[in-house]
Amino acid sequence: MTLHKGYRNKSRKRHRKNVRNRGLGSIEKYLVDYEVGNKVDVITDPSKHKRGMPHRRFHGKTGTIIGQRGRCYLVDVKLGNSKKILIIGKEHLRLNPVSLKKE
């Protein structure tokens, strides 16, 4: 059988929810409004498939919001020596706690 290279290939460990945290989660993450310049962490929510979900290589990365496109946000993330612009839904973003302490 051939090796498949799908969008969620080799992501069983990082796209797994806690046993006590199964389900759709709270509504609070949909009520957060991000502004341009906010530092955010890209933490993918596996219960929301293909709704602004970034590739698994960006899970755990920190980026800066540079704009909004529809219900998603444009996030500038550094990956190696290059910068990538991602279109990510707000359920896959969290405010970076380090940037909140500096304000």
Image: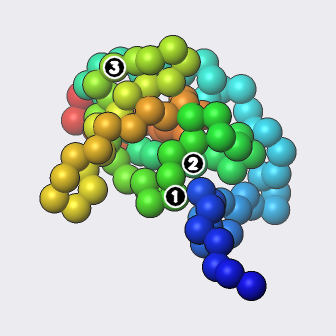
Q: Residue at x 74, y 85 (%)?
A: 1
Cβ atoms at labels 2 and 3 below 8 Å apart:
no
Disc 2 marks a residue whose amino acid type is Thr
Q: Give the colour scheme of this rendering.
A: rainbow
Is any part of residue 13 visible from this angle? no
Q: What residue lies at 65% left-to-right and 72% top-to-bottom?
A: 4
Label 3 belongs to which residue?
Answer: 67
| Residue 86 image offset from top left, x and y in percent | 39, 38
* Among the two numbered marks 1 and 2 on one chain, the one whose residue lies closer to the N terminus: 2
- Disc 3 is placed on an element classified as strand
Amino acid carrying label 1: it is Arg
Q: Which mark is residue 56?
A: 1
Q: CA distance from mark 1 to mark 3?
A: 22 Å
Residue 3 rendering spot, x and y as whole percentages: 64, 79
Residue situated furthest bottom in the rendering:
1
Disc 2 designates what residue?
44
Which residue: 68% across, 81% down? Answer: 2
Check disc 2: other Cα within 10 Å, few if <14, some if 14-19, many if 20+: many
Q: Contact (CB < 8 A) between labels 1 and 2?
A: yes
Q: Amino acid at mark 3?
A: Gly
Question: Is residue 69 found left or right of 16 in the rendered image?
Answer: left
Give how far across and how far down residue 76 sits, in percent.
29, 37
